[in-house]
Image: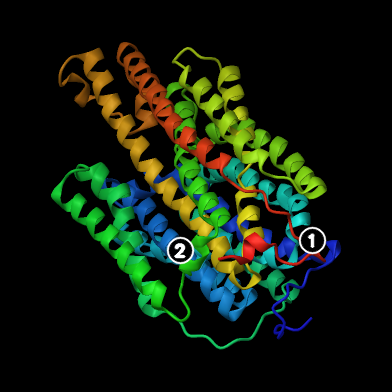
Amino acid sequence: MTDTQTSTEPVYFSHRQILVILAGLMTGMFLAALDQSIVGTALPRITSELHGLNKLSWVVTAYLLASTAATPLWGKISDLYGRRLIFQAAIITFLVGSLLCGFASNIDQLIAFRALQGIGGGGLMALALATLGDVIPPRERGRYMGYMGAVFGSASVLGPVLGGTLADGPGWEWIFWLNVPIGIVALVVTSYVLKLPHVRREHTIDWLGAAVLVSAVSSVLLYTAWAGPEHGWLDSMSLSLLGGGLLLAVFFILIERRASEPILPMELFNNSVFSITNALGMVFGIAMFGAIIFVPLYLQIVMGMSPTKSGLGMVPMVAGMFSASIPTGNYVSKTGHYRFFPIASTIFVAGALLLLSTLDADSSYLNVGIGMFALGFGLGLTMQLLTLIVQNSVDVRHMGVATSTVTFFRNLGGAFGTAVFGAVLNSRLAHHLETSFGPGAGTSVNTNDATAIRHLPEPVRVKVIDAFALSLHEVFLTALPFVGIAFILALFIKELPLRSRSTPMPAEATEL
């Protein structure tokens, strides 16, 4: 198979060829998925050793900002230059950032290197999914969803365990250096197996659009992940970032309407399936990321688990994902019908959030496990399905940018959800601590360190844990309205026939 071709028709591969390609893609996906869970466990120790505990949030924000902003760019560039070369460029960028993170000697260096790592990470997941869209027809793609679910699930469990083990053993540097051998394997495998066709065509890079997009996303994310939580949502600096980001977003739309080769073609949003599915992904991402982040907080603080044990404690959620994603993928491949699953997914997630909101300081792990399983099951019904729906609705020439757009909006929703729910937790925790200890008394208690909370004197510890349990109860309830919006959006998704190896593009998908 040559790397270039002149036809715009997709070239699909056999099941055996797909499994070989999938091996290379899953290695790259695992790098990105593992990073989301392995770093968080050791972050307090990392920032303490680098004397930058006050800048802990920036280590997360730098990666998130760079990753989200870069995602659409990777997708567009891969449409122009081919998947393999750009996917490998993303892997190399991620590995260089990882290597430098391990050698960071102060907190400012770590933040900068995390941003570089995030630029590469922004391409790993989106380009892997776009490549699958190139080689597997949508009608058959569902049967491979279980493999992708396995990547996320294993990373979710292994990440916290590895993070805690490496930080306690050889040192936190190995959390980043561990990426290097995995990434080298990914580069070798992709060099041999990703012999993909690519349409050679004339093109120009929309550098102005790219710069404005990165600036707009950076401004909005800095507002949600940093300025709002730290300085106040209505602070003048915070509002300047938000207003500037929104103005730049409008400017970006105007640029893209005139660009000959736009980074994000505005014509795609004329497709109702594309628009509604991405809106659903963003709103669902708000609830999904918020819930996933705060469940481990309940396990560590309220139930007193160590970071390593809390990683293992998340197994029910992973089991729920597997239980839903594999049968869902097989059903979609067999019948070609998918519209029911996003609707059912929102119902399961809403039920899980209601169940999690009933937990208190005396709840058993069985109750927590049932809630996590239900949440994982709901997420498994639709996590990868939204990508399939969008890929099936667009022309093949837009596969990369369309796939990266799904990841982009989901991450944007996740950043917003994390910030909003974090603000809810902090405000309600302060309220409940004042109720327990009296005005101003609760501020003298260290609530930023789970280990310190476990070692508080018994009367104080019980009150702090009760305050956290009540606050998390309100966090989970806050997520419910977003799930309600997601349910309404899911009702409006049109079900297009899934393309097979022999069927042409559906009419709805070409009317952009």
Is tag 1's residue or tag 2's residue first in the polypeptide sequence? 2
Element class at badge 1: loop
Q: Which amino acid does label 2 sit on?
A: Gln
- Marks 1, 2: nearer the viewer: 1
Q: Is 475 drawn above or below residue 188 in the view shown?
A: above
Name the quadrant containing residue 131: bottom right
Specify whether 509 is left or right of 488.
Answer: right
Q: Place residue 1 in its image quadrant.
A: bottom right
* Residue that appears at 36% across and 53% down: 61
Query: 321 above or below 55?
Result: above
Residue receiving disc 1? 500
List the residue tagged with mark 2: 117
- x%, y% of residue 245? 28, 59
The answer to whether residue 121 of the structure is visible from this angle is no
- Viewer-closest of 239 and 391: 391
Count how many numbered circles sit on residues in the image: 2
Kind of residue indicated by mark 1: Ser
Name the foreground residue: 214 vs 511. Answer: 511
Q: In which quarter of the image is the C terminus?
A: bottom right
CA–CA distance in space, label 1 to label 2:
37 Å
Identity of the residue drawn at 55% across and 50% down:
277
Q: Please provide percent x and percent y for residue 305.
A: 50, 27
